[in-house]
Amino acid sequence: MNKNQMPKLQPQIPTMIPPSAQPPRTSTPPLGQPPQLGLKTNPPPIQEKPQKTTKKPPPAKEELLKMTENVVTAFLSSKNMNDAVNGVREMKAPKHFLPEMLSKMIICSLESPDEDREHVSTLINTLRMEGLVTGENFMQAFLSVLDQCPKIELDVPLVKSYLAQFAARAIIAELVSMAELAHPLENGTHFPLFLLCLQQMSKMKDREWLTDLFQQSKVNMQKMLPEIDQNKDRMLEILEGKGLSFLFPLMKLEKELLKQIKADPAPQTIYKWIKDNISLKLHTDKGFVNILMTSFLQFIFHEMFFTEGDDQLSAPTKEQLDQEKQLLLAFKPVMQKFLHDHVDLQVSALYALQIHCNAHAFPKGMLLRYFVYFYDMEIIEEEAFLAWKEDITQEFPGKGKALFQVNQWLTWLETAEEEESEEEAD
């Protein structure tokens, strides 16, 4: 065949095979070639998923209440505190349930003897010491049970007295403070529960301890009464009826001292009555001095203007002024007995005078007269007058008017004292 007769070879066009039709690539490279970087030569091991642990749900409320009842029943039977505390711990009650748990404990013991209620109080306080409950939990529980009182009273008529025992023991154990208990009971809420609590505490502790605790609490007793009874006379009447007037010895004194002075104004009789009726501890109390001075001032004022219709705001007659001075001189030994060498008490006496004058709309010249009397009779010292002048307390009404009336005299006193000091220095 001639060269020219040979058939022409057509160039081969590579056929395009779609990827889907191509054979699969193997992960093993051709023999003699290194494996391609970045490609995994072995498939990852299959990891088994950890099995889900089913968390046990917390006990339902009904179950927790039943568990609480069982703990209390077992505790009152055995009196084993450790078992009871462990029983509460094992309940693993959520925090929001703790007040209901304590409420249930209190309610479970209401129909039990006094001894059992005392044991439950001890259990609650032990739970507090173990960090399982708080004082706030107790207050929430206590108020919750109080709200249920109308219903509980059908079966337990003395429920408020029993709750007062729980409150009293909680205060004594310092689970809650007296102020914390008093706050939600103001304006006669659940009256007379707060007074019942004080009565219970007076049985458990001595009166002096309770009086000190009450005074430290700063509780306003008038606010603990129904609004209609929120005045001093009615308060004292209610407290006397509950055997609690000892908490306010000065209030009772205010009523009784003036009565005693009117019955027999002889200074020896008055002093003996004070010694027999007023605790020695109160003899240096500012409140006592205020009442003592007020009683004397009221008696003198009444004796000067004893006739109805006398114009108390007009200038007194010479006879009235003489009577005023003589009466004050008669009371001088008693005043000196309690005021001598006590500048702070002398300042209290001046405030009693200020309040007395303010109550009578500052009769003309009265305050200045008494300042002079007190100074000349050596009932009150210069230092006390000047301390009263500089004191800026707003506790006692009428200070501005009082200062205006005696400012000139105080300036004279201050100057005289400075001159006297200079002469002594020379």
Image (tube, rainbow, N blue to C red):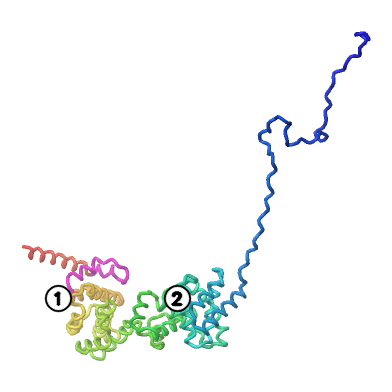
- Look at discs 2 and 1 and give the one toward the viewer: 2
Rendered image quadrant of residue 371? bottom left
Q: Is residue 326 left or right of residue 355?
A: left
**Where's residue 213, x and y in %?**
36, 77
Q: Which residue lies furthest to the bottom in this view?
A: 263
The quadrant in which the N terminus is found is top right
Residue at mark 2 to residue at mark 1: CA–CA distance: 51 Å
**Where's residue 23, x and y in %?**
81, 35
**Where's residue 16, x and y in %?**
82, 28
Stretch of the chain drawn in magenta: 380-405
Q: Residue at x 85, y 21 (%)?
A: 12
Rendered image quadrant of residue 64? bottom right
Q: In this view, does 13 lie above or below 251?
A: above
Residue on which the image places disc 2: 181
Q: What element carries label 1?
A: helix
Q: Would residue 192 be visible to someone looking at this image?
A: no
Q: In this view, does 302 lie to the left or right of 11?
A: left
Q: Residue at x 48, y 79 (%)?
A: 81
Q: Residue at x 58, y 77 (%)?
A: 67
Q: Which kind of residue does numbered mark 2 sit on?
A: Leu
The quadrant in which the C terminus is found is bottom left
Which comes sooner in the sequence, label 2 or label 1? 2
| Magenta region, main secondary structure | helix
Near-viewer residue (175 or 269)? 175
Residue on which the image places disc 1: 376
